[in-house]
Amino acid sequence: MAMIEKGRGIQVEFATMATKIMFTSPVLDIGESWVRVGFPKTLVSLERRSSDRYVCRDHLMSFLSFSLWEPKVNDVLAPPMYAHQKESGAMVTIADISVGGICVVTRFPSICSVFFRGVVDGRALLHLPMQIPLPVEAEVRWIKKIKEHVAQPKADGTISLYTRSYRLGLQFRNQSESSKIAIKQFTQQLALKDAI
């Protein structure tokens, strides 16, 4: 707030999921915890993603294993853990994928205690169907907590229940050519929707 001056221009940015909207506007007034800006003359919209995203379907499930997080047996906020399934317990489902990054989804909030915006996992493993795990460096770009209503029919009416899921958007960094090729091949499989 100390760098903002009344009468000077300020650049305002809104980063949504797919686009970033920007404008420059004069500062009209400054308060202790607020800034009032003039109405912008123009808006600039930029496409944030450089490659298409593809939804991972049930028959082509893919997963990400983090090196910075693994579920603990006594952690009630983690996925169920069994000693003989330690590796698969740490795999997080990929909701969608592109050459530039992925969105992972889980119902277990323990992952949010380790990951937040800007955290980089330099030794994550990408598990694609019928391929050896690919080492990737992934940076957390965003986290969303999603609450969904689920109606449960009962004999004397319906019960309102809610499920919560956690989505993390991850951007690949310092990708090797072999991982780019493997991801492109996988996204081509996903693009062949309902092909026989």
Image: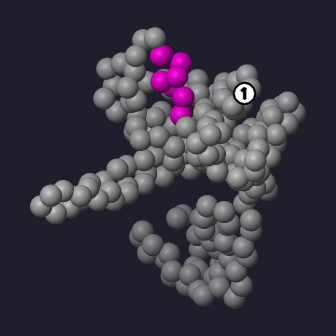
Instruction: Indicate left or right for 138 with 156 as reference.
Output: right
For disc 1, the marked residue is 130
Q: Is residue 117 visible?
A: no
Q: Residue at x 74, y 65 (%)?
A: 47
Instruction: Reply yes or no: does residue 173 show up in magenta.
Output: no
Name the outermost residue toward the top. 84
Name the outermost residue toward the front. 196
The image's colour scheme reads one colour
| Residue nearer the viewer, 16 or 126 | 126
Instruction: Indicate left or right for 149 with 189 as reference.
Output: left
**Residue 141: % across, % down:** 61, 48
Q: Which residues are magenta?
A: 85-92
| Residue nearer the viewer, 90 or 68 | 90
Q: Residue at x 33, y 25 (%)?
A: 75
Q: Residue at x 46, y 46 (%)?
A: 166
| Residue nearer the viewer, 4 or 61 | 61
Q: Residue at x 68, y 77 (%)?
A: 23
Q: Main secondary structure of the magenta part?
A: helix
Q: Is residue 11 above or below residue 139?
A: below
**Residue 45: % across, % down:** 72, 73
Asked which secondary structure carries label 1, the reply is loop
Q: Is residue 50 above or below residue 95?
A: below
Q: Is residue 131 visible?
A: yes
**Residue 55: % across, % down:** 64, 51
Number of numbered discs on residues: 1
- What is the crowding at mark 1: few (fewer than 14 residues within 10 Å), some, or many (at least 20)? few
Q: Is residue 167 above or below residue 11?
A: above
Instruction: Reply yes or no: does residue 90 show up in magenta.
Output: yes
Q: Which kind of residue does numbered mark 1 sit on?
A: Met
Residue 27, by quadrant, is bottom right
